[in-house]
Amino acid sequence: MQKKLVMATNNANKLREAREILAPLGIELISQKEAGAYIEPEENGTTFAENALIKARAVFAETGLPTIADDSGLCVDALDGRPGVYSARYAPKGEECAKLLEEMKDIPDEKRGASFQCVIAYVDADTVFTVSGATIGGKIGYEERGTNGFGYDPVFMCGDRTLAEMSAEEKNKISHRAVALNGLYEKLKEKV
């Protein structure tokens, strides 16, 4: 396997998180833009795995470099699993938490259960696989708290703290993406 790997994203936070976890493998992880892929694949799958594969295949086709892509989202029990695979498009960027809190304003504490789910796809010239089943359970809080996270982290409670109140080191031990990336790490360890 080449020591250069593309992540089908331009999200600096996702890239940073992946770089931290995959660093011990000596892999240079670059964004799709750094690899010259200026595309936005249409995520029209109905599952996290389908969307991750759509992105990984599209960026691999553009760059010819081994590519990983994740699809993840927040699944809220009281909202029948929404926003789910539509988490990134649930509200305008930066307004996701406010919209979710508004939808949840009349939901009692015992019905605020939620989970983050993540699937990571890997594609190269010879291999296609997904690492799935990575979830983290918690509940939706009543206000945004913390500054260390992104997306829905400021309203997602793990115990008495939100993900955004945790350090990167703490979050990387338990987050849905970290769990999936650690699964990817184990698979990539066999290839490098």
Image: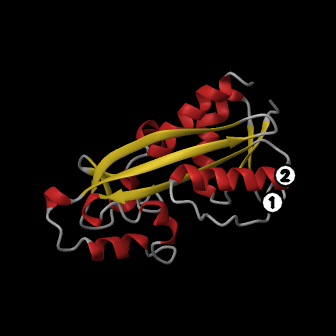
Reply above or below: 16 against 173. below
What element does badge 1 sit on?
Answer: loop
Q: Residues within 10 Å of mark 2 (few under 14, many from 20)?
A: some
Relative side of 167 to 139, left or right: right
Reply above or below: 20 against 77. above
Name the residue at 53% across, 46% down. Answer: 119
Where does label 1 land, which residue?
37
Q: Are marks 2 and 1 in contact (CB under 8 Å)?
A: yes
Reply above or below: 16 against 188. below
Q: Quadrant of the N terminus?
A: top right
Q: Quadrant of the C terminus?
A: top right
Relative side of 110 to 39, left or right: left
Any mark on residue 47, and which? Answer: none
Nearer the N terminus, badge 2 or badge 1? Answer: 1
For badge 1, the amino acid type reads: Ala
In percent of width and height, residue 161 lies at 29, 51
Relative side of 34 to 11, left or right: right
Name the residue at 25% across, 46% down. Answer: 159
Any mark on residue 63, and which? Answer: 2
In percent of width and height, residue 70 lies at 59, 50
